Image (spheres, rainbow, N blue to C red):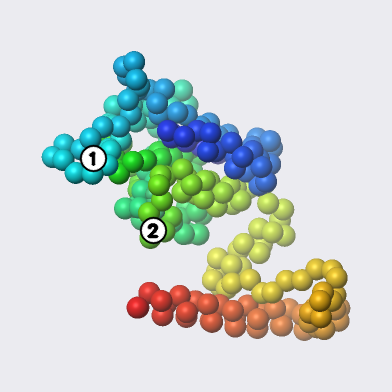
Amino acid sequence: MKIDVLTLFPAMFGGVLSQSMIGIARKKGILDITVRNIRDHAEGRHRTVDDRPYGGGPGMILKVEPVIRAVERTQAERGGEGHVILLTPRGRRFDQAAARRLARLDHLVLVCGHYEGFDERIRIGLGPEEISIGDYVLSGGEIAAMVLIDAVTRLLPGVLGSGESLAEESFNEGALLEYPQYTRPAEFRGMRVPEILLSGHHERIEEWRRRRALERSRARRTEARDDEKT
Ligand code: ADE
C-alpha cells in the first residue's frame, strides 16, 4: 500500500513511522509512506500557508492553493489520484470497519489540517472522504493520521503473523473485548495467575476466556452506552 501524508509538521511523524509495526511493514516493503510538507507548495518569500478568515472571526484558516498544489504534485508523482482523506473533527467517526475498508485500497493521500479550519474550497476541490478519530478536538490532523495509519497497517496482508490476524477476526465478528492475559511469574506481590490457566486443560481454558471476554464486553460496552445518554 502507498500512503502520502500532507502536513505542516512532517517532523511529528518521524518516530511513529519508523518504529514498531509500521516500521516493520515499511522495511518489508508492504507499506510505502511519504510525508510531504504543505509549506513546500506555498508561494512568496514567507511561504504563507494560513490567513485570516473572510468575514472576520478568531483563528487562522489553512489556505487553498498550497494544499491543492501539494495533492496534485503527489498524484502526479505517484501516477494516480489515490483515495484522498481529510482528517477533521467534522468527519465520519473512524472505527475498525473503516480501517478494514481502507486496508483494501492501494493508495491513500492523507491531508492533515491545522489552525481553526480549512478553506472550504479544499473540500470542494478535492472531494475527499472526511474522517474524525473521535468526538474531541485535536490541535491538528497529524495525530489522527497516525492513528489511522497504525490501524490500517496492522491489517495489511503479511504484517501480522497468522495467529495474530485470527485474533483480529474474532474481535471483528463477535465485537468482544479481549479476555485477561498473564505471563510469568505465576505470582506477583500476592496476585496469582488464575489456576485454570496453569492447568493445561485447553477446553476449559477456552471456555474461561470466552466467559471473561463476554463479562468484560457486557460491563464496559454497557457503561459506554450509559455515558452517551448523559
Ligand atoms: N483534527 C482535529 N481534531 C480531529 C479529530 N478528532 N479527528 C481527526 N482530525 C482532527
Outermost residue toward the front? Answer: 58
In the displayed structure, 75 sits above or below 16; it is above
Residue closer to the observer: 4 or 20: 20
- Amino acid type of the residue tagged 1 in the rendering: Glu
Identify which residue is drawn at 23% across, 40% down. Answer: 120
Image position of 80 (left or right of 207) = left
Give the quarter of the figure containing the C terminus: bottom left
In the displayed structure, 94 sits above or below 75; it is below
Residue ID for mark 1: 120
Task: Judge the density around disc 2: few (<14), some (14-19), many (≥20) Cα neighbours within 10 Å.
Answer: few
Residue 114 appearing in the image? yes
Outermost residue toward the left? Answer: 55
Identify which residue is drawn at 80% across, 68% down. Answer: 183
Image position of 94 (left or right of 42) = right
Q: Which of marks 2 and 1 is nearer the N terminus?
A: 1
Mark 2 residue CB less than 8 A from any atom of ligand 1: yes
Identify which residue is drawn at 41% across, 76% down. Answer: 227
Residue ID for mark 2: 136
Mark 1 residue CB less than 8 A from any atom of ligand 1: no
Task: Judge the density around disc 1: few (<14), some (14-19), many (≥20) Cα neighbours within 10 Å.
Answer: few
Identify which residue is drawn at 61% across, 51% down. Answer: 154
At which x and y percent is residue 19?
66, 42
In the displayed structure, 80 sits above or below 17; it is above
